[in-house]
Image (tube, rainbow, N blue to C red):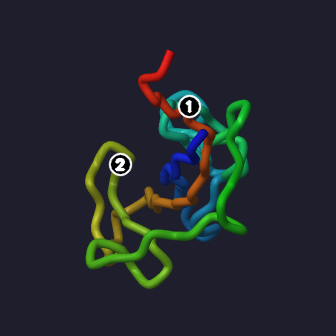
Amino acid sequence: MLHEVITVTIQENQRKVPMRGYSAGHLLALSDPPAYKGPDGSRGKVPDAAAPLADGERWVDDGWRVSIGDETDADGWRYARTFGATGHATRGLTDVCRFRTWTRAKKRLVALDTGLP
């Protein structure tokens, strides 16, 4: 048996309410994505709920890491007017949505095919 290492990516989402700021608690139930959305569409209020481990899988590292790059601010957020947009690193006056990507590595056992009977 071999171990296969897989990087799992989830998205965190928040909505802004004037004078109250950004929060997952401000998300609109019928139209917005969940606070955390996993790669297979799973939902959760915390990262691990959005990316549950299957039988035989386990986390490789100690926790989730925010992805930070040229298209994000220093905390990994991208801002937009809607959740369907690509987003940008600088928050604008009309940007009421923000989202960021988290990653974490997991491993699972993979059967080794030796070709022997």
Q: Residues within 10 Å of mark 2 (few under 14, many from 20)?
A: some
Amino acid residing under circle 1:
Ala
Which amino acid is tagged 2? Thr
**Image location (x, y in percent) of residue 51:** 63, 42
- The 10 Å Cα crowd at callout 1, few under 14, some 14 to 19, many 20 or more, is few
- Residue visible at 72% across and 51% down? 46
User: In this image, 63 relative to 81: left or right?
Assistant: right
**Of the image marks 1 and 2, the number of the one nearer the N terminus:** 2
Q: In front here: 12 or 69? A: 69
Residue 52 screen position, x and y as percent: 69, 38
Report the disc number at residue 82.
2
Name the residue at 41% across, 76% down.
68
Q: CA distance from mark 1 to mark 2?
A: 44 Å
Name the element at disc 2: loop
Residue 111: image tag: 1
The answer to whether the residues at label 1 and label 2 have Cβ atoms under 8 Å apart is no
Asked whether residue 10 is in view, the answer is: no
